Each structure stands twice: as structure tokens, then as C-alpha cells.
Amino acid sequence: MITKPRGSNFIRQFGGPGEGTQIVCYKFWQLVVAGGCPYRCAYCFLQTVPWFRFRPDELYGLVYTNVDDMVEEIKKWLADPIPKMMIAGELQDGLVFDSAYKKTSGKALTHHIIPLFAAQKRHRLIFLTKSTQIQHALELKPTPQVVFSWSVNAEEVGATWEHGAPLPSERFAAAKKMKRAGWPIRFRLDPMIPYPNWKKGYGEAIRRINALSPEMVTLGSLRATSYNGLRNASKANGRDESIFDYLTEEKDPSGFKYRLPFAKQVEMFRFAVGQLKTNIKPALCKEDRALWKALGMHFDGCHCLLGRNDSIVKERHAEMRQPKTADRPAGLGKSLPIMA
Ligand code: SF4
């Protein structure tokens, strides 16, 4: 693990595919709590992020030493009167460095930042993780302002392609402990893979999700910005690139990512939504409007947003009601059923 001060801002808003896109939700706020990740998921997009391509040693863990600067930035962000959600875990695993921060700064990362969110009622923070390092967070008093979200999968997918990470069953066990301690929890069932017998594996994962009654479940499936780029990086890093056999050379209608065949993605997400208890809210992340429409789902918040009243939700509704004609993919844009 590398330690050094962060030279740029700790907080930024994801720019994603940019204005005029039909990718529905992407403008979330992220807190860059660390860099990289000690786990070795075959599909991890960090492997193709230019920063890590040129600094391969930092891909496996970069902990920042200027935590005071991070704390000051968070305090300024929290002073904004418009309620917002912030995610820790987009360019890194959000929780796996908790103990590393305790070693390097004397305090776990959770202990540095959770009290800042707990001291106010406007904004929320969400940790996205595959880690089971909940011991430091459990020392704190639970607060509705901080959510813990586990990225989970069918057990077989976790065992095959998420090397080094705790098995999904272990993540569910950690989530159960946090829920019992009074913390809000969420899940991302992502990336769904149409491996043989996927209905059995995902049926079991969803049974575990239902038993824990999370606030929300965000669905995702295998994707990549470059068709061969991520596969090649995975292979070069000694990971099992066979997962990319499921990817097609077809991009989503926005041209944002290579995906599973559209019909298969719809089939898997329909299956998942159909198995989820009706009181658990399903959502999609960085998906094309065509998919929301095919699933009959309404965009009123997502994993990294507060809900239908989040300012980013309102902003995207307004933007997508008036897409730029030149940027609009053929066949989309006349009616906006998902933006109701
Ligand atoms: S846990 Fe997340 S950040 Fe870590 S290797 Fe897997 S996909 Fe990448």
C-alpha cells in the first residue's frame, strides 16, 4: 500500500458521458477517500483508468496522508443548503482502507468522516464496498445520515471473478451486523453475469437481500468502456478474463458502454426485480434510458442520490425533457415515460 498526500480535490461530481446523453443517472457526488483497491475483481474498471495504468503500484491501494484537507473539504460541502448524497467507493473500495487510515493517521477513516455527517440532518453519505471491515464503524453510534452499501453477487460469480474479496455470503453477514446495529444499508447486485444456472445463483442472492430489507437495491450487469481494453488489462494483471466472453460488441444506445446483449440484460433485471420484495426499491446506475423504459422503471433517485427530491434528479429530468437533437440516438426521445 502506498501513502502520499492527495494533490487535487477530494470531492468531485462525476462527469460521466456528459450533457445531452440518454444515460439517465450519472452526476453523483464522490468523495475520493483513497485510490485503488487490494481486491482483484476480473472486471474492475480501475484497471483501465489512466491514473492507475501509469501508476500500477497504486492500483492495489493508495492511502492519503492529508486527511485534514479531506475533512475541511467535507465541512465546506456540508455547508451547502441544498440536500445531497455523497458516495465513498467509486474510484476505490469505500471501506477496505478503514484500518489503513487508523494506522497512518491514528483514526479509522469512518471515524474521521462519519461524525461530520452525523452532526447534521441535510446531507447523506454512502459507503460502497465489498469489504467486511466493519469493526471500526461498529464502534460509532448509528446515524440515518450514513448508509453502508455492499456490492454483492451470486456466490459463484464472487468466487470465480472477484478474487481477494470476501465472498458475497461474507458481505451479507457484515451487512446483517450493521443492520442489526441500527445502520441504514443498501445493496448493489452488480455485475450480473448470465453464467449457466444464473437464475439459481441470483435467486439465492436476492433471497438474502430480501431477508435484510435494505433501503434500495441497484442492479448492474457486465460492462466496459473499451471492448478489448478491459479484457486485455485484466489478462495483463493476471486476472480471469473469461468473464468478458459474456460481453457483446454492441454498445448501449447512448454509445456509453459495451454491455450484455440488450435482451439478456432486460431478462436478468426483470428476473431480479420480480424476485425483490415489493417494499425494496430497485434502481439502475449509469444505464441508458432505453433500459429503464424496457423495464417500465421510473427514475426518482438512485443508489448515490437522495431520492426523488434530490437536485440531481430534478436536473436530469429537466435535461432529458429537452435532449439536444444532434446528440440524441435514433429512435429515442419522443416520449419520456421513465421521466414521469
Ligand atoms: S472491489 Fe471494486 S474497486 Fe475493488 S477490485 Fe473489485 S471492482 Fe475494483
Image (spheres, rainbow, N blue to C red):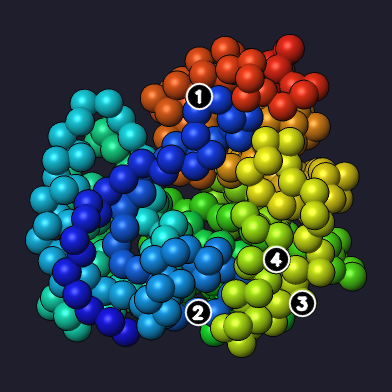
Q: Is residue 242 left or right of residue 29?
A: right
Identify the secondary structure beneath mark 1. Answer: helix
Q: Earlier in the sequence, mark 1 or mark 4?
A: 4
In the displayed structure, would residue 122 be above or below residue 245? above
On the question of residue 134 being in view, the answer is no
Q: Residue, x 81% and y 56% (percent of image)?
A: 248
Residue count near mark 4 (Cα–Cα under 10 Å), binned few <14, some 14–19, many ≥20 = some
User: Residue 228, labelled with which disc?
Assistant: 4
Label 2 residue near ligand 1, CB within 8 Å: yes
Mark 1–mark 4 distance (CA, rounded to whole Å): 31 Å
Give the residue pinned by disc 3: 242
Q: Earlier in the sequence, mark 4 or mark 2?
A: 2
Identify the secondary structure beneath mark 2. Answer: loop
Query: Of the residues tagged 4 and 3, which is closer to the observer?
Result: 4
On the question of residue 78 being in view, the answer is yes
Q: Residue, x 13% and y 66% (percent of image)?
A: 66
* Amino acid under disc 1: Arg
Query: Of the residues tagged 3 and 2, which is closer to the observer?
Result: 3
